[in-house]
Amino acid sequence: MLDKSEYLDRLKAGCITTLILTIGGITLARFSSELIPEDALGRAVGILKAVAHYNRLQIVNTLLSGEFRVKQLVDQLGLLQSNTSQHLSRLRSHGIVKSRRDGYKVYYSLTNDSIKKIVESIIAEI
């Protein structure tokens, strides 16, 4: 992986011609000469920050396999119910997870395949 200065040097030298980065269904940049729009950049940073927490990444990793209730996540991950709910709330506020209600039960799942791809690519590199 290139650090920022190496990337900029290669960009200036014309070694890098295209960049396609999609986060949360938003294509941030198509060509290296294009800057990421401010609103998309802010949203992408928010998504990455939200996932960049030990417990939230574990929750998202668990949700890769489908829908879960808070109780199921608590049992599987060994977290407190209140903490799990707070983490899910933060993930939902950034559009990473969605919820659906069935009577008094609330089920959580990932919002889209883009989030799945991001997390799967992170985990694959570990």
Image (cartoon, helix red, strand yellow):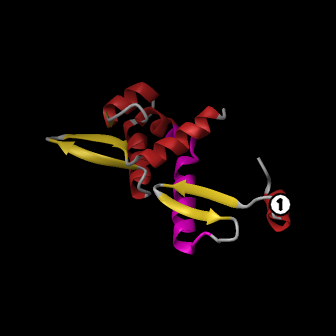
Numbered label tally: 1
Query: Residue at 52% across / 72% down in the picture?
Result: 39
Vertical arrangement, residue 114 with respect to residue 68, above or below: below
Asked if residue 93 is among those painted magenta in the image, a careful observer would answer no
Q: Residues within 10 Å of mark 1 (few under 14, many from 20)?
A: some
Q: Which residue is mark 1?
A: 10
Residue 123 as seen in the image, left or right of residue 110: right
Q: Position of residue 13 (x, y in %)?
A: 85, 65
Q: Position of residue 40 (x, y in %)?
A: 52, 67
Residue flagged by tag 1: what amino acid is it?
Arg
Q: Position of residue 81 (x, y in %)?
A: 37, 37
Q: Position of residue 42 (x, y in %)?
A: 55, 67
What SS does tag 1 mark? helix
Query: Residue at 66% across / 35% down in the picture?
Result: 125
Asked if residue 40 is among those painted magenta in the image, a careful observer would answer yes
Query: Residue at 52% across / 52% down in the picture?
Result: 50
Q: Which residues are magenta?
A: 36-57
Quadrant into which the C terminus falls: top right
